[in-house]
Each structure stands twice: as structure tokens, then as C-alpha cells.
Image (cartoon, rainbow, N blue to C red):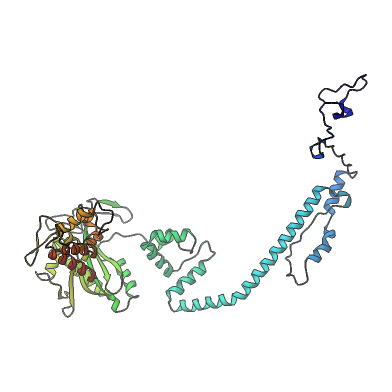
């Protein structure tokens, strides 16, 4: 390393010999290319200060206007361009002596913003033109909907109500629309709440529906509210659709008396009870009557009673009174349906005159027939329970009907990967007391898959599947009967 690699500033002055300064670094390498040379950047000289005072310069900036941009603005906007809104754009331009980077940057930003706003105005004017073109079509459709709504068209009435409620925070809903919303929320509360919260449709709130429903009086029997409900329903049905069935069933409830201050009385006492009680006891059962359509799907609870140790004669009297009240409104009761418990069987026998038959004269009109039937779901569960009961022996023309072939089929395939009957499970063959209440498993026990597998085992003469023709025939009869019954 020699003195050629150092600058003159790196050596000490006033010395006989050339001595480097402390901290001197070689920076000159003649043999190296320029991009490898160490170059020390020199600081640019400071700019001259503006001789105009700050206050006067600020005043000049405030007094500046957009004269320097008028020509460029006129050239950028053609004569065929849509008229601009009345908004005035003010640009601050700097004089020739105030051409600093700060003012130039603001000028560029304001100019870009002006172009964006101009483009936005053009888009909005195009949208406005398209809306003006489609307005006659929309207004014509609204007029058609209004005309259909005058003729009590349900769809048109609902659409007009939604159009009137659009964009309003507080809308006074019509009674027709509120009634439809009450039925909708009663059938599907989650669906109604989902549509309302997602703002897919403007719908009345739960508090609004509650005000229209009103408080319940907790009255038993055929109440005026039920009568009004039936009158509203019958107005929407044809004469053929007014024929229906009366279903009655009871359920166990907890014996408990509770004072309700809204109605000012104690609820929980039995309104119908056995004659052995001298006063009103606490009810342990709830008896309910439901009206269902034969050709149309509707289910309307028409009466309910809190009971205690009720006998079948009293229940038959309640059934007759309910049928009379329903037929006064205009419905026609053609069938009476109940489950297969012994108490209801006695009521049915009393209705038929001692012996249960499928057709009897109507108690309210001897010229019309009344059909008596039991609930198919309860019957199929009862058949399944007796079919699986090992202590009960079923016979068909002297041949045994047993569930042992079905149990053998389950034991044979439960460890196989590929099963002949995939739906055959333990809950179908060995159900618990709670699992016996499931109707779908009872129906699947008599399905085509299981009977086909039994037929295949019988034809192959496999062990445990011989002489099961009577069992297969019984299972097929049960399946076909349940498919035919409405």
C-alpha cells in the first residue's frame, strides 16, 4: 500500500515527510473499475431562501386561482360530455418563484382527484339514463301488482306490502301481512328469524307479532279464539277441502298448580275428572283434539282439557261435543282417529256401540257415515313390538310367525364389511323401551331389503332360514298395508 491510494487531504500538513492522518482510509485504486471505486457523495448546495416573507407568501397562495388550469380543463372536457354538477373545484397553483416539490405534489394530486371525480360523474349519469329507460317498465309492473292485490291475490298483496315497507324504519304493517307472518314464524321460527336478520325481506319484528297475537287467556275447551281461527281457515277452503278427521290423544303432565297473575287464577287443576273426587284435583293428563284435512294438509288444534282419572264415557262425550262445534262452523267430520292404548280402544268401542267396526252412522247425522280408525304409526309400532316379543307366539294358518330369522340375519352380517341389508341395525332388532317409540325403525323392519334377504336365505336353504314363508308373508303384508294407509 503506497501513497498513490490516498488523497492529499489524508496527509498531515507542515511536515517534512508525508504522514497520514489518524483514521485515513485508502480510496484510490487505479486498476479497479469505476463501479468498485469508493466515491464520497458531495452534499448539494443549499437552496436560496425565498425573499418574500412567510405571511405575504401565504397570502399569495390563498389568492391564487385556477386560471392556469382553465385551458387544460376546457380541452379535457368535450362539448358532447354530460353537464357537470354545480360543485366548484378550486386548485391552488404556485407562481413561478414558488415551484417547490411540495406545491407540485399537491397540484398533481388535485389534478388526479379531479379526473377521478369527472369519471365518477360520467358513470352516475349513465346509470341515471338507464334508470330513466327502465322506469316505465317497473311502474307498469307495479300497476299490475296493485291491480291483482285489489282482487285479493295473496302474492300481489304480499309484494305490495314489501314495496311499501322498503326503506322505512317504522312501517305500519297490514293485518293481512301480519297474519301470514305469524303463521310463518309459528311453523319455522328459525327460518323467519334468518330471513329477517339477513335483511333479505323487510319483515315485522317478534314484538309486533306478539302485539297482534295478544295474551292467552288459558281457557280450556272450544274457546272463542279457536272458533275465530276455524272461521278464518274455512274461508280459504273449497267445499271438498272442508272434509276432515278428528284426532284425539292424551299425554302425561306433571301435577302442579301455578298462579298466573295475567289471568288472575290458578292453572293446573283438572277441568274433567273422575266422579270419585269431590273437588277439583290437580291434573295429571292433557287431552287434545286436532282437526286435520283429508284432501288438504292442515292441522288445527280445536280443543284441549286437563284431566284426572277420566273414564271412557266422559271422553266420548267430549269427542261428541267437539265434533258438534266443528260442524257448526262448516267443516264435515268424516273420520275419528286415536292410538291403540286400551283406554282409547274402550272409547272407540263405546262409540261403535260395543264392538269396534270401521264404519258407523254419524252421531250427529244418521244419514252420513263416520269412519273409525286407529293411528297407522301406533299400529305399525304395536305390530313390531309383538313381532319381536319372544314371549308372544304369532300363528298364520298353523305356521309360526317369529322374528328369529331377522335376528339371525343381523348376527350373520354384523361383522361383515359388505352387508346384505345395510339398514339393519341393533336398534331395529333389539330396541329399548325408548327406541320402541321410533316409527321409522319399525317401518324399516318390514322393508323390502330385509324380506328380500330372507327370501334369498330361504331359497338357498341356509341354516336357520328354512320354513320361514309365513314370516316373510306377514312382513310383506305389514309393509304393503302401511304404504296404502294415508
**Residue at left 88%, top 24%?**
11
The quadrant the N terminus occupies is: top right
In this rendering, the answer to whether 417 lies above or below 486 is: above
Instruction: Report whether residue 313 is seen.
Output: no
**Residue at left 20%, top 54%?**
412
Q: Nearer the viewer, residue 82 or 293?
A: 82
Q: Nearer the viewer, residue 303 or 142?
A: 142
Q: Quadrant of residue 365?
A: bottom left
Q: Quadrant of residue 21?
A: top right
**Residue at left 78%, top 51%?**
105
In this rendering, the answer to whether 238 lies above or below 161 is: below
At which x and y percent is residue 419? 26, 57
- Return the residue found at the far front: 31
The quadrant the C terminus occupies is: bottom left
State how many labels appear.
0
**Residue at left 91%, top 20%?**
17
Amino acid at each position: 500500500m503506497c501513497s498513490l491510494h490516498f488523497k492529499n487531504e489524508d496527509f498531515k500538513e507542515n511536515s517534512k515527510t508525508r504522514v497520514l492522518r489518524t483514521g485515513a482510509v485508502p480510496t484510490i485504486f487505479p486498476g479497479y473499475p469505476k463501479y468498485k471505486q469508493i466515491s464520497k457523495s458531495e452534499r448539494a448546495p443549499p437552496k436560496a431562501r425565498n425573499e418574500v416573507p412567510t405571511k405575504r407568501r401565504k397570502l399569495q397562495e390563498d389568492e391564487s386561482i385556477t386560471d392556469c388550469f382553465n385551458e387544460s380543463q376546457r380541452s379535457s372536457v368535450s362539448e358532447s360530455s354530460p353537464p357537470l354538477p354545480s360543485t366548484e373545484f378550486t386548485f391552488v397553483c404556485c407562481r413561478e418563484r414558488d415551484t417547490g416539490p411540495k406545491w407540485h405534489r399537491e397540484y398533481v394530486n388535485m389534478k388526479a382527484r379531479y379526473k377521478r371525480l369527472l369519471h365518477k360523474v360520467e358513470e352516475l349519469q349513465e346509470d341515471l339514463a338507464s334508470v330513466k329507460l327502465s322506469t316505465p317498465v317497473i311502474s307498469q309492473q307495479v300497476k299490475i301488482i296493485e291491480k291483482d292485490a285489489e282482487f285479493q291475490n295473496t302474492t300481489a298483496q304480499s309484494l305490495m306490502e314489501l314495496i311499501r315497507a322498503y326503506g322505512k324504519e317504522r312501517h305500519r304493517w297490514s293485518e293481512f301481512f301480519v297474519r301470514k307472518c305469524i303463521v310463518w314464524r309459528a311453523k319455522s321460527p328459525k327460518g323467519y328469524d334468518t330471513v329477517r336478520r339477513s335483511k333479505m325481506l323487510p319483515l315485522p319484528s317478534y314484538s309486533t307479532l306478539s302485539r297482534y297475537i295478544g295474551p292467552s287467556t288459558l281457557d280450556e275447551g272450544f274457546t272463542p279464539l279457536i272458533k275465530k281461527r276455524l272461521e278464518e281457515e274455512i274461508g280459504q277452503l273449497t267445499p271438498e277441502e272442508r272434509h276432515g278427521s278428528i284426532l284425539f290423544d292424551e299425554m302425561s303432565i306433571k301435577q302442579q298448580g301455578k298462579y298466573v297473575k295475567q289471568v288472575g287464577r290458578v292453572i293446573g287443576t283438572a277441568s274433567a275428572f273422575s266422579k270419585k273426587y269431590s273437588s277439583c284435583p290437580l291434573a295429571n293428563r292433557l287431552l287434545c283434539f286436532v282437526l286435520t284435512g283429508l284432501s288438504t294438509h292442515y292441522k288445527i288444534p280445536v280443543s284441549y282439557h286437563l284431566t284426572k282419572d277420566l273414564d271412557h264415557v266422559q271422553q266420548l262425550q267430549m269427542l261428541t261435543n267437539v265434533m258438534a262445534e266443528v260442524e257448526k262452523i262448516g267443516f264435515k267430520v268424516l273420520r275419528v282417529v286415536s292410538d291403540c292404548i286400551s283406554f282409547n280402544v274402550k272409547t272407540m268401542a263405546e262409540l261403535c256401540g260395543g264392538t269396534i267396526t270401521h264404519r258407523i252412522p254419524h252421531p250427529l247425522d244418521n244419514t252420513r257415515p263416520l269412519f273409525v280408525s286407529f293411528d297407522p304409526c301406533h299400529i305399525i309400532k304395536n305390530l313390531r313390538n309383538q313381532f319381536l316379543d319372544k314371549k308372544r307366539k304369532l300363528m298364520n294358518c298353523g305356521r309360526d310367525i317369529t322374528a328369529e330369522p331377522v335376528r339371525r340375519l343381523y348376527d350373520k352380517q354384523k361383522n361383515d364389511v359388505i352387508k346384505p341389508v345395510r339398514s339393519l341395525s341393533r336398534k331395529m332388532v333389539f330396541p329399548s323401551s325408548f327406541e320402541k317409540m321410533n316409527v321409522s325403525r319399525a317401518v324399516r323392519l318390514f322393508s323390502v331389503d330385509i324380506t328380500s334377504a330372507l327370501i334369498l336365505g330361504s331359497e338357498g336353504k341356509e341354516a336357520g332360514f328354512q320354513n320361514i314363508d309365513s314370516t316373510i308373508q306377514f312382513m310383506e303384508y305389514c309393509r304393503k298395508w302401511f304404504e296404502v294407509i294415508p
